[in-house]
Amino acid sequence: MAWIASVIAIVVFCAAPAQAQNYPAKPIHILVPYAPGGISDIASRILGAKLTEAWGQQVLVENRPGGNGFIAMAAAAKAAPDGYTMVMATGGDVAINPAMFKEMPYDVERDLAPIAMVSDAPLVLAAHGGAPYNTVADVIAAAKAQPGRISVATQRQRQHQPDRARMDGVEYRHPVPARPLQGLFCCLGPVFS
C-alpha cells in the first residue's frame, strides 16, 4: 500500500469535445485538499505557473484543507464538468479514503477522471538530531521498551493510520487532537524540539 500513499495525481472533469477548441477561455482553478506549504500545494503552484505560461490563461491554486480531503474533493466533484476545476489529489484521497469511509461526499470512479501523475513524494520518518535512532527498527525497539514515551506527528490524523492502529506491535496514538487548517508544519515544532 506504500505506493498508493506516494502517488499524487491530478484529476479533472473532462471538457466536452466542442469546448476543447477554445479551452481554456477563462481562469482554471486547482483545488488543494491541504494547507499551504505541503507537497500538494507546492506541486500545484509549480504546475499552475507552467500551465498559465503555456496556455496564456491564469491558473489559480485554492487551498481547501480539512475533512480528510473531503472539502476540496467534494467541491471538485460538484463542479461543472467543463475542465475549469481540477483537484490535486493524493493516494489518500482517491484510494485510502474510499477504503476507510463507507460514506463520502464524492465517488472517485463516477465523479473524477485521472489526468497525470504529477509527483512521487516520499514519506519521511524523522527525529530530533539528538535522538538515539538510526533506523525504523531502533524507533520500534525504543517504543516497545518505553510504552507511551514515543510521540509521532502527522499531517493528517486518520489518513494513513486508523485510530490506535498497531505497527509491529507498537501502539500508535496521535500526540495532539486534530487541528483543522494547520497542515503539516503545525506538528514539526513538538517533534523536533
Image (tube, rainbow, N blue to C red):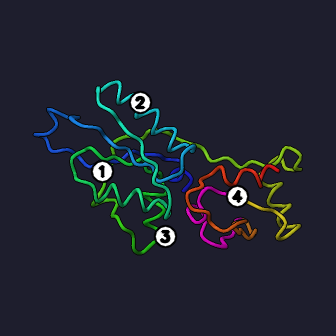
Q: Is residue 168 magenta?
A: no
Disc 3 marks which residue?
100
- First reached walking from the N terminus: tag 2 or tag 4: 2
User: Looking at numbered disc 3 in the image, what kind of residue is underneath it?
Assistant: Met
Check if mark 1's residue and mark 3's residue have beta carbons within 8 Å. no
Disc 2 marks which residue?
49
Between marks 1 and 4, how big is the CA–CA gap?
A: 32 Å
Q: Relative to 124, does residue 101 appear above or below in the rendering? A: below
Disc 1 marks which residue?
113
| Residue at 86% from the left image edge and 61% from the top image edge | 142
Q: Quadrant of residue 153?
A: bottom right
- First reached walking from the N terminus: tag 1 or tag 3: 3
- First reached walking from the N terminus: tag 1 or tag 4: 1
Q: Is residue 157 magenta?
A: yes
Q: Position of residue 45 (x, y in %)?
A: 46, 36
Q: Point out the frontmost of discs 3 and 4.
A: 4
Q: Point out the frontmost of discs 2 and 3.
A: 2
Between marks 2 and 4, how big is the CA–CA gap?
A: 31 Å
Between marks 2 and 3, how big is the CA–CA gap?
A: 34 Å
- For mark 1, give the secondary structure: loop
In which quadrant is the N terminus drawn? bottom right
Specify the segment rendered in magenta: 154-167
Check if mark 2's residue and mark 4's residue have beta carbons within 8 Å. no
